Amino acid sequence: MLLIQNQAFDPRSSDHEVIKQSLDQFIGTKSIRVEWFDFSLSQADALKYYLPLIQYAQANGFEVHCHMPVDMSKHLVRYKHLMFVDPLFLRKFKFKSIEFKLPVERPDLMR
């Protein structure tokens, strides 16, 4: 999901040209957030759907930040799908920042 000024764009269900036209309306805006909520998204799908749009946004002067919600992190750790923590994969996107929280299970709270 691409988020910019309270508007969300889903590259998997929307036409890339329509999203690019929408991004052109926000050229004066400084940054865009990319949030991955889909637990089944593979690296190949992320490259196919997100990389062209992120490169387009970066070419137009946007700072692109990545955010991974806590429930996504929990899922990736639980099922050992740590594809988004792969530095070689993330380097392709050239994010300005990457934010994710790994879940912490405290034994003293597990009683």
Image (cartoon, rainbow, N blue to C red):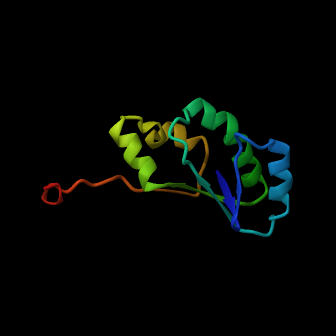
The picture places residue 35, in percent across and down from the top left corner, at 58, 53
User: Residue sitting at 77 percent across and 48 percent down?
Assistant: 56
Taking 55 as reference, is 23 above or below it? below
State how many labels appear. Answer: 0
Q: Quadrant of residue 5?
A: bottom right
Asked whether, in this view, residue 105 is left or right of residue 81, the answer is left
Q: Quadrant of the C terminus?
A: bottom left
Residue placed furthest toward the front:
111
Q: Quadrant of residue 26?
A: bottom right
- Of the pair 22 and 30, the residue shown nearer to us: 22
The picture places residue 104, in percent across and down from the top left corner, at 27, 55
The picture places residue 34, in percent across and down from the top left corner, at 61, 53
- Of the pair 36 and 97, the residue shown nearer to us: 36
Asked whether, in this view, residue 104 is left or right of residue 14, the answer is left
Residue placed furthest toward the top:
44
- Of the pair 25 and 10, the residue shown nearer to us: 10
Taking 5 as reference, is 105 above or below it? above
User: Residue sitting at 39 percent across and 56 percent down?
Assistant: 101
User: Residue sitting at 55 percent across and 32 percent down?
Assistant: 42
Asked whether, in this view, residue 85 is left or right of residue 9, the answer is left
User: Residue sitting at 47 percent across and 41 percent down?
Assistant: 87
